[in-house]
Amino acid sequence: MALQIINAGPPPEEIAERIRTAIAQAMPEAEIVVHPENPGHFAITVIDAVFEGLSRVKQQQRVYGAIADLMAGPSPPVHAIDRLECKVP
């Protein structure tokens, strides 16, 4: 008998676009790339001048703050960010 996932949620590409949109709203000048990794897991690269002078932790906190709603609740569409790169142009 094969494993069947019922109500698996939106496709990973749709969730990736929701992540990109949320970050873009918080950081309109950013260049953003989001790749689905595994179900609910994503890799994100954000390039923005707003990161200038911030520690790596503060840079990542800005990104996580932008997507917090997508990671909250009992069945969030984003389970984990496997890789988060924040860069200054």
Image: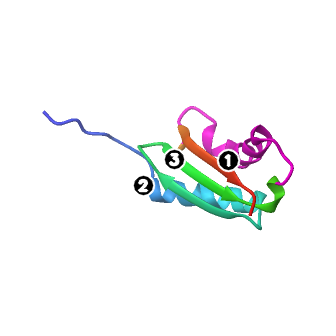
Q: How far apart are marks 2 and 1 (CA)?
A: 17 Å
Locate residue 88: give its quadrant. bottom right
Q: Disc 2 designates what residue?
A: 11
In this rendering, position of residue 8 left or right of residue 44 = left
- Which sits earlier in the primary sequence, circle 2 or circle 1? 2
Which sits in the foreground, 40 or 3? 40
Report x, y in % for residue 6: 33, 41
Instruction: Give me the residue at 62% from left, 59% from top.
Output: 20
Which sits in the foreground, 52 or 38? 52
As drawn, the label of residue 2 is: none
Instruction: Give me the residue at 51% from left, 47% from top.
Output: 42
Task: Assess disc 2: are there few (<14), some (14-19) or many (≥20) residues with their C-alpha within 10 Å of its C-alpha.
Answer: few
In this rendering, position of residue 75 left or right of residue 22 = left
Residue range of the region highlighted in magenta in the rendering: 52-76
Which sits in the foreground, 34 or 59? 59
**Callout 1: SS:** helix
Inspect the image, locate mark 1, and give the three-letter code of the amino acid beneath it: Ile
Inspect the image, locate mark 2, and give the three-letter code of the amino acid beneath it: Pro
Instruction: Give me the residue at 61% from left, 55% from top.
Output: 45
